[in-house]
Amino acid sequence: MSASPQTSSPTTPALQARGVRKSFVSGRIQSTVLHDLWLDVHASELTLISGPSGCGKSTLLAILSGLQPADAGGVLALGHELSGLGMRELEYFRLQHTGFVFQGFNLFPALTALEQVELPLSYMGLAKGLARKRAVESLEEVGLGPRMSLRPSELSGGEKQRVAIARALAKQPELLFADEPTSALDAANGQIIIDILHRIARTHGTTVLCVSHDPRLVGHADRVLAMEDGRILSDHAPSASPSSAPLREPSA
């Protein structure tokens, strides 16, 4: 496949948007959701795109991750122009190099936590033993080692989201995309999730891009892009340092 990542210098952004524009049509009305956005996202950082619902941040995430095409402009991911990849090449690129975490967890009710994490590894062609090893290590990394035999109905909301993160992490992706990962969680579980995402960026060198309207996340990102009406209004590094404390379960 031609969608293998190109070698780039450490200073080259892992993800780049170049004049990205997107509109949607409803009847005779055309609404522009993204207005010619330019953006660089770097590895080993947790970058947060914040803003109110409807500002275009989830659409931007979908375009940057290759789930949706832009109307104009382009996206460079790991040195590849996504619009230049065919459908099968794009699917292969996402499978091999990206991980996704969604608000709704997207877990299969009949599978255990371990089986949830192993499933995408089988699609990647990993041997069963290696897939099991990676799945166990990823669940242990997010603090779910003792609960990997449980099904979603036996897990809390925070634990379900940690299974979803472990599923993405086990693929060892260069790019990790998180869409509203804490909005369905209470403060304690939300804190755990954002700490895990930040730790993944730092310890694995992963490019982590998160979109959220949750103000609790702002102080825990390396970089915050404030978005409104399809435009990026500001770009700054929060003064507060993300927590480096060991993972702890929220109190009951």
Image: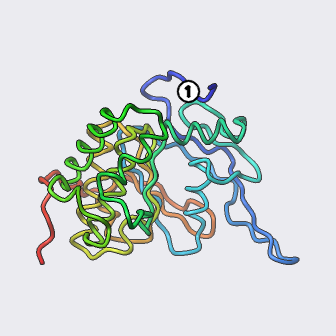
* Closer to the camera in the image, 215 or 105: 105
The residue under the point 29% across, 65% down is: 151
The image quadrant of residue 138 is top left
Q: Is residue 136 above or below residue 250?
A: above
Near-viewer residue (45 or 113): 113
Residue 51 vertical placement versus 70 (above, below): below
**Residue 49, how many percent across, how many down?**
47, 59
Total count of labels: 1
The local crowd at label 1, few if under 14, some if 14 to 19, many if 20 or more residues have their Cα within 10 Å, is some
Q: Given the image, on which type of amino acid does mark 1 rest?
A: Ser
Question: Could you say whether the residue bearing mark 1 is in a helix, strand or loop?
Answer: loop
Q: Is residue 44 left or right of residue 4?
A: left
In this image, 30 relative to 170: left or right? right
> According to the image, label 1 marks what residue?
4
Q: Quadrant of the C terminus?
A: bottom left
Q: 174 and 230: which one is in front?
A: 174
Residue at 14%, 65% in the rendered image: 249
x then y, percent, for residue 178? 44, 57
Q: Quadrant of the N terminus?
A: top right
Q: How is the image coloured?
A: rainbow
Quarter occupied by residue 230: bottom right
Residue 90 position (above or below residue 153): above
Q: Nearer the viewer, residue 35 or 236?
A: 35
Report the residue at 32% width, 52% height from top. Answer: 197
Q: Position of residue 128 (x, y in %)?
A: 35, 35
Q: Residue at 47% across / 62% down in the picture?
A: 179
